[in-house]
Structure formats: C-alpha cells, structure tokens
Amino acid sequence: MAIDSYRFLDFATRQIMKAWAARQEPGVIPFTPLAKPLHECTVALVSTAGVARHDDRPFDQDGERRNPWWGDPSFRVIPLGTTEKDVRLYHMHIDPRFGEADLDVVLPMRRLAELAGEGVIGRPAPTHYSVMGYILEPTELVEKTAPAIAERMRAERVDAAALVPA
C-alpha cells in the first residue's frame, strides 16, 4: 500500500512540496547495526526544533524571512541537564510554546535519563544537538553540519543518536 505523504496538505502546498521533493533523487540510507547492545550504549539526541540556549547565538530567522526557501543550516550544542529555563526555540514552522514549556517535547533528555535508569540504554551523552527543521536547501546541512555533529559525537564516544523531529 502506497503512503500519501501529502494527504493532509492543501492543493497549492501539496504541489509545491512535490516539486521540491523531486529536486533531489533519494539516496540509499545504509542500515548500520549497533556495535554493542543498546543497554551498553551512550545515546545522543538531535532535535530539529531550533533549540538554542540563551547564552548561545540564536538560529537565523531573519534570513528565512527574506528567503523562505532558506533555513539556517548551523547547529547548537545542548549540554545534558539543560532545562526549559535555559533555552528558546527558533523555528518559524512550529508553535514554540510547547517545547519552551516542556523541553522534553522537542529534546527529551529527561526521558533519555529515565531509559538509562531502567537499564534500556547505557547512558545519555553529555551533549545533545539541535538544528533547524524545514531546510529546503540541505546541501550545507548534509555536507558540513551533519559531519561536524558526527565528529563531536565520536569525540564523546556516542554509540547511537536519536533524531527528534519537530
């Protein structure tokens, strides 16, 4: 059975999104099994909610206002233990109030800690990450941002990462 990813979109938005999706051929996503059991793994989170700490630079929303096809391809580092009072969400395509009221909605570090406490995972990584969702031109995100995040994860000996879409 085919899945209609555009089912709930209005006609104009559906046409725009189909045209955008056709711009790039889907590539092969290699299956990568874990090298050790999940209960021994260090796990990091990557959110697409545009989460940034108050003491860090915000994601660039002005650039997106000027060019709606552009999204800030940079990333922010979110240390373990960061809470709602420490952050703001910079995302023009979601209602930020929910994530700002409960950070676990978009970056579930407390839930990850619970999984560690229950022995499901080994431990949460000391650092988690956030990027902007809705990046319609992903070249820099794919070629620079993702490898930079991966390098930081390798340095912290992260075994697995969970993507938290916003």
Image (cartoon, helix red, strand yellow):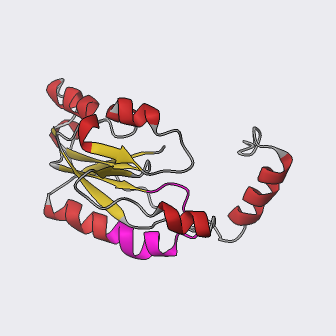
Residue at 77% x, 40% y is: 7
Tell me if I can see residue 34 in this picture.
Answer: no
Q: Is residue 34 left or right of residue 164?
A: left
Residue sticking out furthest to the right: 11
The front one of 61 and 114 is 61
User: Which residues, given as a range, are shown in magenta?
Assistant: 132-147
Tell me if I can see residue 88 in this picture.
Answer: yes
Where 125 falls versus 56 (above or below)?
Answer: above
**Magenta segment: does it hold 140?**
yes
Q: Is residue 99 left or right of residue 8?
A: left
Image location (x, y in percent) of residue 29: 49, 61
Please identify the quadrant where the N terminus is shown: top right
**Magenta segment: does it hold 26?**
no
Residue at 45% x, 34% y is: 97
| Number of marks present in the image shown | 0
Image location (x, y in percent) of residue 63: 52, 69
Image location (x, y in percent) of residue 26: 61, 65
Residue at 33% x, 70% y is: 147
Determine the image quadrant of residue 100. top left
